[in-house]
Image: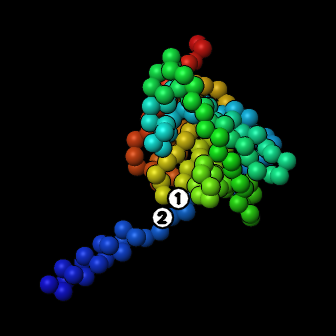
Amino acid sequence: MLRTLCAGIAGILAGCSTPTPMPPVAHVDLPRFMGDWYVIAHIPSRWERNAYDAVESYHLLPDGRIQTDFSYRDGSFDAKVETMHPVGTVQPDTNNAVWGMQFIWPIKAEYVIAYLDDNYQTTIVGRSKRDYVWIMARVPCLPDDVYARLVRKVGELGYTESLRKVPQQCKR
């Protein structure tokens, strides 16, 4: 009985453990990061589950915060465009790689830039809980080999859930 009780307590405590922090990139040049990023694939939040043509746009505000406009079509390419407007705040001493993203005051969700290529063309944004992740690019569609490499990187960051590839209207 004592073993069962101890095993149960150990299981509860293991469930309460803090996740391994999401490793951020070494540095983000904020002005260079600003602009449009197409959401290529993700583990979506509730609002994004059926997103088509998803785009995250960042604009640096005079006070250093980041105005974000997330636009998408819900369920099809023909649906009307929905938009959300969270504001990002760069966390101190993170070299601009960790933000608090505020959708509803006073809650700020963790937003970690975990991968960013040298040319600022592809990025992966994640969270330490490994509950959400976004692969984004400056173009709406990526070559298969680039996409596969980014998906592998998401796995290396500790994600185990399958990604949803976001339908984007690609001009080929």
Q: Residue furthest left?
A: 1
Residue drawn at x 63%, y 52% is 102
Q: Nearer the viewer, residue 93 or 27?
A: 93
Q: Nearer the viewer, residue 72 or 105?
A: 105
119 up-or-down from 79: above or below: below
78 up-or-down from 52: above or below: above
Instruction: Provide the secondary structure element on which disc 2 rests.
Output: loop
Residue drawn at x 66%, y 37% is 69
Q: Is residue 34 left or right of residue 108?
A: right
For disc 2, the marked residue is: 19
Which percent across, then down, holds residue 125?
59, 46
For disc 1, the marked residue is: 128
169 up-or-down from 69: above or below: above
Mark closer to the chain start, 1 or 2: 2
12 up-or-down from 134: above or below: below
Whole-Å distance between the Cαs marked 1 and 2? Answer: 6 Å
Crowd rating for badge 1 (residues with CA inside 10 Å; few <14, some 14–19, many 20+) = some
Q: Is residue 170 left or right of residue 89?
A: left
Q: Is residue 94 visible?
A: yes
Contact check, label 1 and label 2, Cβ < 8 Å: yes
Q: Is residue 115 visible?
A: no
Image quadrant holding the C terminus, namely: top right
Q: Is residue 9 left or right of residue 104?
A: left
Residue drawn at x 69%, y 50% is 88
Q: Is residue 23 left or right of residue 13?
A: right
Instruction: Provide the secondary structure element on which disc 1 rests.
Output: loop
Which percent across, then down, holds residue 93?
74, 64
User: Which amino acid lies under the numbered mark 2 shown in the image of this protein?
Assistant: Pro
Q: Residue 39 sits in which quadrant?
A: top right
Crowd rating for badge 2 (residues with CA inside 10 Å; few <14, some 14–19, many 20+) = few
Which percent across, then down, holds residue 155?
47, 47
User: Which amino acid lies under the numbered mark 1 shown in the image of this protein?
Assistant: Ser
